[in-house]
């Protein structure tokens, strides 16, 4: 159990995490990808940038994501199941998606926000961590997310120049202790 939520009485521990009379995380999987991407942006957790190959294209060819922070449950600032309203500038049309979110929506956003694809099925992502990001207190679920979605080195083998650059980086870069929390490539 995450730090700050343990209690010897399981009912009290559950009451800190779940809404009354709920016994599971209240994720709404019917929300569109844009709902989850918006959650990550309005919490200042990430900054997205999408790139199109040509100005007349409607879908991105690739995207970047700068990870600024990952909010730990104990730093959420209110009960994890209590809804937070989207800032007014993000409330486009109510039929698009719900204009509130909870910590559980925030957590699910890390799994659903990146699920975009173009018609050629060739969209790719470049993730990197902002140099000011604090990695000393990452939630357990984020470490699992990183292990599941992290870099796949096998993709580099199809591109010898990229693979050579990666091998040079791997052989010459010495990570800091906080960077060692992430699994190696």
Image (cartoon, rainbow, N blue to C red):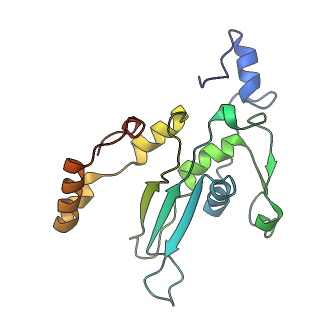
Quarter containing the N terminus: top right
Which quadrant of the view contains residue 80?
A: top right
Residue 155 x/y as whole percent? 26, 59
Q: Nearer the viewer, residue 77 or 82?
A: 77
**Residue 107, x across and y down, in percent:** 61, 43
Q: Residue 61 location, x and y as percent?
A: 43, 75
Instruction: Determine the residue positioned at 83% across, 64% down.
Output: 88
Taking the spot 26% from the left edge, 52% from the top edge, the residue there is 153
Q: Please tell me whether residue 64 is drawn above or below residue 84 in the rendered image.
A: below
- The residue drawn where x is 65% and y is 17% is 6
Query: Which residue is at the front of the view, 59 or 153?
Result: 153
Q: Residue 160 vs residue 49: left or right?
A: left
Residue 146, given in percent of the width and then of the height, sits at: 44, 43
Residue at image point 73% right, 44% down: 102
Report whether 137 appears left or right of 43.
left
As drawn, is 6 to the left or to the right of 82?
left
The one of 168 and 115 positioned closer to us in this rendering: 168
Q: Within the image, what quadrant is residue 121 found in?
A: bottom left
Q: In this rendering, is residue 185 above or below 144?
A: below
Q: Residue furthest bottom?
A: 56
Residue 25 in sight? no
């Amino acid at each position: 159990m995450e730090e700050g939520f343990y209690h010897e009485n399981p009912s009290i521990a559950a009451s800190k995490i779940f809404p009354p009379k709920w016994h599971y995380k209240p994720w709404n999987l019917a929300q569109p990808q844009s709902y989850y991407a918006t959650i990550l942006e309005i919490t200042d957790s990430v900054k997205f940038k999408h790139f199109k190959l040509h100005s007349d294209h409607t879908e991105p060819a690739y995207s970047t994501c700068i990870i600024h922070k990952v909010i730990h449950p104990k730093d959420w600032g209110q009960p994890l199941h209590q809804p937070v309203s989207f800032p007014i500038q993000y409330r486009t049309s109510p039929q698009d998606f719900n204009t509130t979110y909870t910590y559980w929506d925030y957590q699910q956003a890390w799994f659903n926000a990146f699920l975009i694809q173009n018609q050629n099925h060739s969209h790719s992502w470049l993730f990197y961590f902002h140099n000011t990001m604090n990695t000393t207190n990452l939630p357990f679920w984020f470490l699992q997310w990183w292990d599941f979605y992290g870099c796949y080195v096998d993709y580099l083998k199809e591109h010898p120049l990229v693979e050579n650059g990666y091998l040079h980086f791997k052989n010459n870069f010495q990570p800091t202790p906080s960077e060692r929390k992430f699994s190696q490539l």
